[in-house]
Image (tube, rainbow, N blue to C red):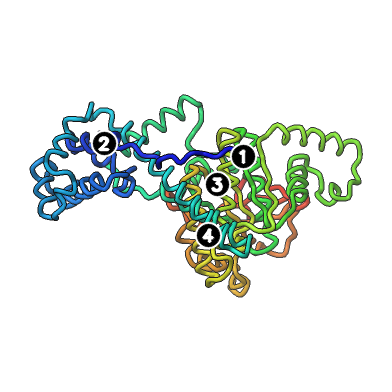
Amino acid sequence: MTEFEPRPLPQSPEAEASLLGAVLLDPSLLDLVRAQVHAEDLSREAHRKIYRTILELADSGRDLTFATLTERLRERGELDEAGGPAAIVGLIEGTPSPAHVRGYTSVVERAAILRRIIGAAQDMVRLALTSTDAKEAVAKAQQLLFEVSESRLHREVVGLREALDDYFTTIEEQNEQGRGPALTSGFGSLDGLLGGGLHPGDVVIVAGRPGMGKTSFALNVMRNAALATDAVCAVFSLEMTEEDLTLRLLSSLAEIDGGRLRRGALDMEELTAIHHASSQLMQRQIFIEECTRLDITDVLTHARKLQVRQGRLDLVVIDYLQLMEGASGGDENRVLEVGSITRGLKAIARELEVPVLVISQLSRQIERRTGGEPKLSDLRESGSIEQDADIVVFLWKRERGAAPQAVPVLDVRVAKHRHGPTGDFQLYFEYEYTRFREVASPAA
């Protein structure tokens, strides 16, 4: 086996020095830099001391100049450790151009991330050598890598100018690609409330009591997005098998009773419809992960792998929240554990820049309430579900008198919408096809 010679940790003192020099030459660049680089990301202690002092001066409202920087370092007793006034002059004079600050920032950030990965790898080696429980060791190793990834999400204050630049850049890219900022759900009433559909970075909770069609609704949204925009979709299922989900997708698209599909008792017309539906689905980028257990690091690992392999990822569906495991493996209070899961899902949505659609149960309290209208407090193990979710959608059935309906009407309520309006509308739910469709006019 080939042995690798020891190599120094990834670092770029030159880029760090140019980064600090650029900020000293043009203090207005500090907002851009601090959004990506923390003091701990610098490999030289002298650079860390200078950067911390620069941040302190900025946060206190004082002007950043050579004089104020050296004075504050002297007051802290760190001027000599930072290399003295000559070292600070060297930073300024050695910087090629402040205009290249984004390049310096990227190099420093990349090296810092690689050092964190190496640190996590060393911790994983120690785990492998000392752990007696292999499953526990794997879970802890996944958590170590997730923490490295999550650290990239903690950004400092960003200037409004930079935020506006990023926004207009995104709009221009979307116009060039002929797409909008949101992923259509295929339901005009829902898209109208959500500003066009599901937006990247949002966690969308779909909740209801058993039998309200939560999984079917999520699969309908996924199918609609895949067919309309060729979206790359991933579904993680803890409740249903790969075969179950596939049959539901086929049943809804071919308009064939799911029970007949399962039994295989189909006539020629139905077989033709199944073949046509299968051809449509096989051309779409829908990926199913059948899970016996699932935690946040599993979702992140598999979703990122799919994103890299396909070049993009447009939607993640999880069925369902209460069956997921926390990082502790069940050693903590379940409400706290679900809270850590929802925070992790939000971190994944932001990092992968993808909407995450999560199915959730409602508690039995709703059945004791007159009218049966759901509330946010009905979310099971709610803790922070309603707090972390950007959007909460309830599926429920209002009492509509004794007259039977040919096609059941379900009520859909957007009970929380962080970015816009809430509201109610109705959808037909064709149980035999596990398919939702729009109601042309308000239901009675």
Which residue is tagged 3? 190
| Amino acid at dot 3 | Leu
Which comes sooner in the sequence, label 2 or label 3?
2
| Amino acid at dot 2 | Leu
Q: Residue furthest bottom?
A: 368
Image coords of residue 192 (percent x, y): 51, 43
Quadrant in which residue 367 is drawn: bottom right
Which residue is tagged 4? 341
Residue 422 in view in this figure:
no
Q: CA distance from mark 3 to mark 4?
A: 26 Å
Asked if the residue under mark 3 is in contact with the one under mark 2, i.e. CB atoms within 8 Å, the reply is no
Q: Residue at x 41, y 28 (%)?
A: 172
- On screen, residue 286 versus residue 120, left or right, reads right
Asked if the residue under mark 4 is in contact with the one under mark 1, i.e. CB atoms within 8 Å, the reply is no
Which residue is tagged 1? 1
Image coords of residue 381 (percent x, y): 55, 68
Q: Nearer the viewer, residue 178 or 88?
A: 88
Which comes sooner in the sequence, label 4 or label 2?
2
| Amino acid at dot 1 | Met
Q: CA distance from mark 1 to mark 4?
A: 41 Å
Q: Residues within 10 Å of mark 2 (few under 14, many from 20)?
A: many
